[in-house]
Image (cartoon, grey):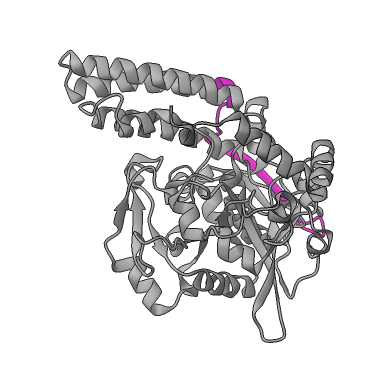
Amino acid sequence: MDEAICITFDDIAQANEAFFAERANVVAKNAVTAQGVRAVAKVPEQAALSTGTFDIEVKQGERTDQKRSGRCWMFASLNTFRIHTMKKYNLKNFEFSQAYPLFWDKLEKANWFFENIIDTADEPRDGRLVQFLLTDPVGDGGQWDMFKALVKKYGVVPKEAMPETASSSNTGDLDGYLTRYLRKCASELRDAHEAGASVDDLRGQKKAYMENVQSLLVTCLGQPPATFDVRLRDKDDNLVLSGTYTPQEFYADAVGVNLDDYVSLISAPTADKPFGRTYTVARLGNVVEAGGVRYLNLTPAELKAAAIAQLKDDLPVWFGCDVDQSYVRNDGIMDLRALDIDGLFGFDIVAGFDKAARLDYGESLMTHAMVLEGVNFDAAGKSTLWKVENSWGKDHAKDGFDSLTDEWFDEYVYQVVVDKKYLMPEQREAFDTLEPIQLEPWDPMGALA
């Protein structure tokens, strides 16, 4: 056997000797084994950059908490809506129900999954496409366009109209058993197809499956209200809204934002995604009749310019990022220099791996959605630090807020959603008129926050 392809005991002894010959390695070992990597690698001076004071700042309500669920994209979306309701009625605080869109998203994702299984019935079961579809058919994550589809179809309700349940606050069992059922149904649909069933026959089976899915969701989340009563009092305790609404009527009256005015911008510098072009992701969505997603790929500087323009109008900005990168969670700071990982271990782990390569090699993608609510500038007017409203409760970081540096934005922010009036004319034209390039279902830009 060629020793070059094996780990030899000489190799192990040599590496051990080199490691323990360095005092810094021994100190690092003792510290990390006792305290953990991030606690030891934290650079206090950089972590201290997290601040509560910003040059431009949107103020709105109390912090929300997604608890043990992956609903960040819903929380972020609703946290961008509620400012319109709070301004309209002069409210001190307001919160939409997050269990309400969760119910409809699970139902629509199940239908989306079944339609994809029927559509790929002739694909090999062990092929990449079908295996991808089976991997996480009804997970909690999502994208802005998927949320827009839910609101356009089902509207929104106040939190008290459909409060949290044990299964919305901790979705593990709900997701696990629903996923198991969907996979079981997928096997039955494919078996029926092999036995000669027509597409109409398969959709007949799907209808029965969907009744069971809805039953499971009602059991776990409760029945979504078809109508509900509303009583809102303003900061001065005046009754400013009362009546009975459907969820669609409530959205029209209490929010009133034209959802089609809001567009999704991404920033992916990979060779297969030229800037200035529009993109979609194959088989990514939830509401079948609404279609999938649509993005315009721009540089980080262009994403920042659009976000700043919207913040200047006192409106928050939905954004998606790879939250865990260079993140000191307890201090609430996302900063490329907040953790000295390479200094701790003594060789390059973080350095030398640029944004495009991280996307191409599976190191980074969008994992979390939050809300931009402020920004600081230097003397030259360049953005330096951004205020972030998270959805991890008021006890997280600084009263539930994080900060991210401008350099971190460049590297790890992948998506922002803004009113298209904040785009440059050529950007609006590109979004509206260019035929989207279709990306593969497993492309990193298809990641669900």
Horizontal side of 385 relative to 267 (left or right) equals: right
Residue 367 drawn at (x, y percent):
56, 46
From the image, which quarter does the N terminus lie in? top left
Horizontal side of 187 relative to 211 (left or right) equals: left
Horizontal side of 186 relative to 62 (left or right) equals: left
Taking the image as drawn, is residue 44 in sight?
A: yes
Quadrant of residue 197 within the rendered picture: top left
Residue 87 or 183: which is nearer the viewer? 183
Q: Start and end of the magenta stretch? A: 218-239
Residue 259 or 9: which is nearer the viewer? 9
Residue drawn at point x = 64 percent, y = 34 percent: 12
Residue drawn at point x = 34 percent, y = 70 percent: 430
Quadrant of residue 14 within the rendered picture: top right
Residue drawn at point x = 63 percent, y = 75 percent: 312
Residue 48 drawn at (x, y percent):
83, 62
Taking the image as drawn, is residue 316 in sight?
A: no
Residue drawn at point x = 64 percent, y = 80 percent: 382
Q: Is residue 378 magenta?
A: no
Residue 208 or 373: which is nearer the viewer? 373
Residue 162 drawn at (x, y percent):
63, 35
Residue 24 drawn at (x, y percent):
81, 50
